[in-house]
Amino acid sequence: ANTEKLQLLKKLVQGETNDVSILQKLAFDKDKQILFFRRCIKVLVHEIGHLFGIKHCIYAECIMNGSNHLDESDCKPVYLCPVCLHKLYFSRLKKCKLKDKDTAYKPLDLMERYRKLEEL
């Protein structure tokens, strides 16, 4: 039975199926499903940060903190700290200078970002 469950999970992870009800078939209760997707989101956001050239953060609680075990990963927030947010901001500014002014790359408007976050 465990081998069958591992095969189902492997199919989901490798993109061989888009049937997320596999988690129910694996006997994941609702809380475990939420935790699974939260962990996936944190890994994706963290790795996207690396794509923007942001290294592991040592300044504050941040999605870019490194982690050595699952408890550390679970405690990380899903957002960037102010230092890493500025790194992202300046990486986008740099790309704007290299690109034509008419491209979609525009500097981040941090004040607009915070206004939108406040609306949530």
Image: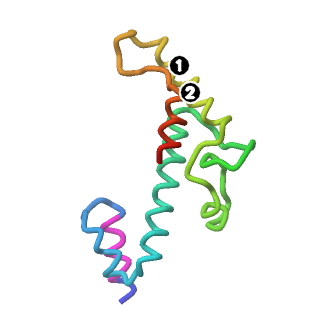
Q: Residue at x 53, y 19 (%)?
A: 93
At 49% across and 11% down in the image, what residue appears?
97
Tell me which residue sits at (48%, 62%) in the image: 38
In this figure, which colouring scheme has been used for the structure?
A: rainbow
User: Residue 117 appears at what percent x and percent y?
Assistant: 51, 42
Q: Is residue 70 magenta?
A: no
Task: Work out whether residue 33 or residue 22 is closer to the camera in this orientation and state it.
Answer: 33
Please, which residue is most extreme toward the right here? 59
The residue pinned by badge 1 equals 93
When the figure is inspected, residue 14 is found, relative to residue 80, above or below; the finding is: below
The type of residue carrying mark 1 is: Leu
For label 2, the residue is 89
Position of the N terminus by quadrant: bottom left
Left or right for 32, reference 50: left
Report whether 26 appears left or right of 65. Answer: left
Q: Secondary structure at mark 2?
A: helix
Residue 19 image offset from top left, x and y in percent: 25, 68
Q: Residues within 10 Å of mark 2 (few under 14, many from 20)?
A: some
Q: Is residue 98 above or below residue 62?
A: above
Which residues are drawn in magenta? 4-12
The reply, left or right, for residue 73 in relation to residue 44 is right
Q: Are marks 2 and 1 in contact (CB under 8 Å)?
A: yes
